[in-house]
Image (tube, grey):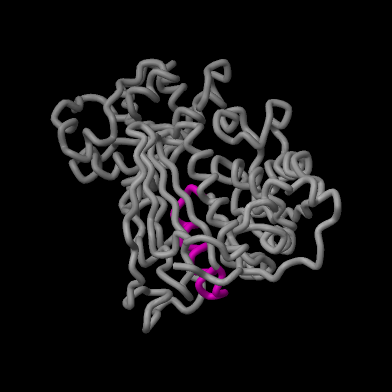
């Protein structure tokens, strides 16, 4: 579907800007008018991570006049495999500041606005209202639903992308002209069902593939050219090198953009998405130990069985001494319960404590009343007990 340009053109391009954007200007569909619209546009990138990195760099190179960046995190060494807007020298720096420096290094004519805060229901409406278009590069469901609902309430279009291992997805959600994110995913998946990139990994270059699609869609919307991905979901399989599309229809029963919406204001998105299930929270209550406590038990030869519920490839990176690997899914399917010892206390751990809490709930319901899990997981263990070991 062809849509009118999202923004009005700027009054002019300087001589330097004409030289810089000349390869755009000689494209008939873009030309002077389209480039002036990009100059006059205000685009907000939610996140300066895997998707935000290529998106911000190409939005800057394309000549988008104002780029906002919502980011509260710091650059970590594990980011550098895919977050190409940051460098080795940026480790420990604010991601927002690092991204700003890179953007201005690409294009000094861009006005960069930083929002160094966590995006929440309390600030999202004020931040989003300052921009024409939102580019969503978030990696958790709570923020995705927050972004969607705020955009629907403000009638803002946003370009969405998602990446995991070798798979990527992208679409444009704009409730005035088509479906919103809730039309595609009315409810979040059950807690722990879909691993995050931090748990499951992502091929670094996949970020560039999906991030560039997002920028392509943003430019089309801003300049009013081409056929945006409104009502279409682009699915990319990097291993098979296949792109395919799925039509997404506007849901008349959608909770936020439907004919009789039930979500008319922002809600508690952490509770809505249930980052950790109620069962896991209840199981962990009073049954969570620290890495230091586990170290005392190991040193004191306590009768414990340490079980690592991560995946084999994670276990090969780093492990707690004496831990036996039994992946979480083995517990969810019930295969692992019969082999658990009855004469020792079961101590579960994962990477950070989320998956082990879910498994702990399974064990409690199966009668292992004294089972515990390690808060902070193997990352907490390395940070507190064996700092010479790697983390991921």
The image shows residue 375, relative to residue 228, as above or below, that is: above
Return the residue nearer the eye: 142 or 249.
249
Question: Residue 296 magenta-drawn?
Answer: no
Q: Picture coordinates of residue 337 (x, y %)?
A: 17, 33
Relative depth, front residue between 182 and 177: 177
* Residue 239 image offset from top left, x and y in percent: 35, 31
Q: Nearer the viewer, residue 197 or 193?
A: 197
**What is the residue that sits farthest to the right in this orientation?**
15
Residue 327 position, x and y percent, is: 28, 30
Q: Give the image quarter of residue 32.
A: bottom right
The spot of residue 95 in percent (x, y) is 68, 41
Residue 15 as seen in the image, left or right of residue 302 = right
In percent of the image, x 36 and y 71: which residue is there? 250
Decide: is 273 above or below 88: below
> Is residue 356 visible in the rendered structure shown here?
no
Q: Which residue is painted at 50% across and 76% down in the image?
A: 265
Instruction: Please give the range of residues in magenta.
Output: 138-156
The answer to which of 86 and 265 lies nearer the viewer is: 86
Q: Residue at x 28, y 45 (%)?
A: 361
């Amino acid at each position: 579907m062809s849509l009118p340009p999202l923004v009005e053109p700027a009054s002019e391009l300087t001589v330097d800007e004409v030289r810089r954007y000349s390869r755009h200007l000689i494209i008939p569909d873009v030309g002077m008018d389209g480039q002036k619209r990009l100059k006059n546009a205000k685009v907000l990138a939610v996140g300066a991570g895997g998707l935000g990195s290529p998106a911000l760099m190409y939005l800057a190179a394309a000549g988008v006049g104002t780029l906002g960046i919502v980011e509260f995190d710091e650059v970590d060494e594990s980011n550098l495999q895919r977050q190409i807007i940051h460098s080795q020298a940026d480790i420990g720096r604010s991601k927002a500041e690092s991204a700003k420096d890179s953007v201005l290094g690409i294009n000094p004519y861009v006005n960069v606005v930083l929002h160094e805060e966590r995006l929440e229901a309390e600030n999202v409406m004020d931040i989003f209202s300052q921009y024409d278009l939102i580019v969503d590069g978030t990696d958790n469901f709570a923020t995705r639903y927050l972004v969607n609902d705020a955009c629907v309430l403000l009638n803002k279009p946003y370009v969405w992308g998602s990446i995991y291992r070798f798979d990527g997805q992208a679409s444009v959600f704009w409730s005035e002209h088509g479906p919103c994110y809730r039309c595609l995913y009315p409810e979040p998946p059950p807690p722990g069902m879909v691993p995050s990139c931090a748990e499951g990994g992502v091929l670094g270059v996949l970020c560039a593939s999906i991030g560039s699609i997002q920028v392509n869609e943003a430019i089309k919307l801003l300049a009013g050219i081409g056929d945006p991905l409104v009502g279409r979901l682009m699915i990319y399989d990097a291993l098979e090198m296949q792109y395919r599309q799925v039509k997404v229809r506007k849901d008349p029963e959608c909770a936020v953009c439907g004919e009789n919406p039930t979500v008319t204001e922002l809600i508690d998105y952490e509770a809505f998405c249930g980052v950790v299930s109620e069962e896991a929270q209840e199981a962990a209550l009073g049954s969570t130990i620290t890495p230091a406590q586990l170290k005392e038990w190991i040193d004191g030869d306590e009768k414990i069985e340490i079980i690592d519920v991560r995946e084999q490839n994670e276990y090969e990176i780093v492990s707690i001494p004496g831990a036996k690997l039994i992946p979480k899914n083995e517990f969810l399917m019930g295969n692992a319960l019969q082999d658990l010892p009855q004469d020792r206390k079961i101590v579960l751990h994962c990477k950070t404590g989320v998956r082990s809490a879910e498994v702990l709930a399974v064990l409690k319901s199966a009668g292992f009343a004294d089972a515990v899990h390690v808060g902070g997981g193997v990352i907490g263990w390395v940070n507190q007990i064996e700092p010479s070991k790697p983390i991921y």
